[in-house]
């Protein structure tokens, strides 16, 4: 149930971010340099988040506990 809640919240956040980003990047009143800068920063944050998740998943698989039963 917890996983379902996390998935629903994540999906909602992605949809809202996509909607706001679309309107930001399509708006002709926003200078091109600002749109490029925001896009590069957003891409960098996305890469860092994906990297952190992958590293955590890899560490989770490598953890070995001697006294803990699974």
Image (cartoon, rainbow, N blue to C red):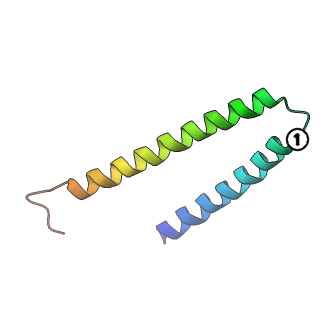
The residue where tag 1 is placed is 27
Q: Is mark 1 on a helix, strand or loop?
A: loop
Query: Residue at 81% of width from left, 31% of height from top?
Result: 32
Task: Specify few, some or many for label 1: CA neighbours under 10 Å numbering under 14, 14-19, or 20 or more.
Answer: few
Q: Is residue 37 above or below residue 1?
A: above
Residue 51 lies left or right of residue 38; in this view the side is left
Q: Residue at image x 41%, y 44%?
A: 52
Q: Where residue 57 appears, x then y in whole percent? A: 34, 55
- 2 or 60, which lies in front? 60
The picture places residue 34, in percent across and down from the top left corner, at 76, 28
The quadrant where residue 36 appears: top right
Return the residue found at the far bottom: 1
Residue at 88% across, 41% down: 27
In the image: residue 68, left or right of residue 40:
left
Give the side of residue 16 with respect to residue 60, left or right: right
- Find residue 12 and report its horizontal and vertical position in percent: 67, 60
Furthest residue toward right: 29
Q: Which of the pair 37/58 is nearer the observer?
A: 37
Q: How many labels does the image show?
A: 1
Q: Which residue lies most toward the left here?
A: 66
- Res 7 quadrant in image: bottom right
> Which residue does the image show at 19% across and 69% down from the upper left?
70
């Amino acid at each position: 149930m917890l996983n379902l809640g996390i998935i629903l919240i994540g999906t909602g956040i992605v949809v809202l971010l996509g909607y706001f980003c679309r309107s930001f990047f399509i708006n002709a009143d926003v200078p091109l340099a600002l749109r490029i800068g925001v896009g590069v920063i957003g891409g960098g944050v996305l890469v860092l988040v994906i990297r952190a998740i992958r590293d955590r998943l890899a560490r989770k698989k490598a953890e070995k506990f001697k006294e803990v039963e699974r």
